[in-house]
Image (cartoon, grey):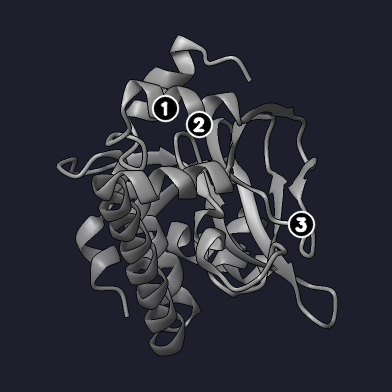
Amino acid sequence: MEPHPLHQRILREHHLFQPLSEYQLGKLLEESQLINLDKDEYVFRQGDACQYFGFVISGSIKIYRLTPDGQEKVFEVIGDRKTFAEAMMFMDTKNYVATAQAVTPTQLLLLSSSTYMGLIRENQDLASALLAALSIRLHTRINEIEILSLKNATHRVIRYLLSQALRSCSSCDTPSFELPIAKRLIAGQLSIQPETFSRIIHHLSHEGIIRVEGRLICILDRERLENYE
């Protein structure tokens, strides 16, 4: 793909690409693909040959696997200016271990894993940036495992709401935010049933702790939510 100044600029904002020289970034973009997906279209499926990792320009991508009984287990939903499948470059497999599917209309770059690996061998700062990114991702997954292991469904939902509120406005007394994805996908991330998620949201609303208007959530009593038992 011919390098585009816009793509170069937005990649520069991501720590995985900041250490690249202009030549290296241009080389990576030359070997990339710009993809536009409609909702529910696939980037790749579990078992496909692994040649690329993704960078979301706009929209969102869910990463999931199917359980033996056919249920989706959503690992993560990737939003704007985030990467996915970069860890596959270091796994001892030639095939994707999960499926990537568009949640909304999405534009993304598919970046050549082999080209990026070649650049890593040339650039020590780039190798350090990638290690830092993978360490952060691992730490996040460990925290999620701890939450799923030690907390019940209500506490998982509360933890999710508080994290979204913090991202929206850390200093607001009554922060509000829109749920970034469908409730069933959030439920999948939290390993609970969609009806359980809806029931908990309804209960917190009935208690006057939050207010719900469609996908808009307003936290009315942050202290009660943080200390809810």
Which of marks 1 and 3 precedes in the sequence?
1
Single out the residue that lies furthest toward the top.
Answer: 5
On-image quarter of the C terminus: bottom left
Does 87 sit left or right of 161 as displayed? right
- Mark 2 neighbour class, 10 Å CA radius: few under 14, some 14 to 19, many 20 or more: many
Q: Please give the residue where the numbered disc 3 appears in the rendered image.
A: 49
**Residue bearing the label numbered 1:** 25
Q: Residues within 10 Å of mark 3 (few under 14, many from 20)?
A: few
Depth check: 219 or 82 in front? 82
Give the total number of marks visible in the rendering.
3
Residue with the mark numbered 2: 28
Can you see residue 27? Answer: yes
* Residue 185 horizontal side relative to residue 70, left or right: left
Kindly identify the residue that appears in the image at 59 percent across and 32 percent down.
109
Query: In the image as oriented, which residue stretches furthest toward the front?
Result: 122
Residue 182 in view of the camera:
no
Going 63% across and 20% down the picture, which residue do you hit? 1
Q: What residue is rendered at 28% in x and 50% in y?
A: 129
List x then y, in percent, for residue 24. 40, 29
Q: Name the amino acid type tagged 2.
A: Leu
Residue 95 rendering spot, x and y as whole percentages: 72, 64
Q: Residues within 10 Å of mark 1 (few under 14, many from 20)?
A: many
SS under mark 1 = helix
Along the line of sight, the residue nearer the viewer: 224 or 71: 71
Query: Upstream in the sequence, badge 3 or badge 2?
Result: 2
Dot 2 falls on a residue whose secondary structure is helix
Disc 3 from disc 2: Cα separation: 19 Å
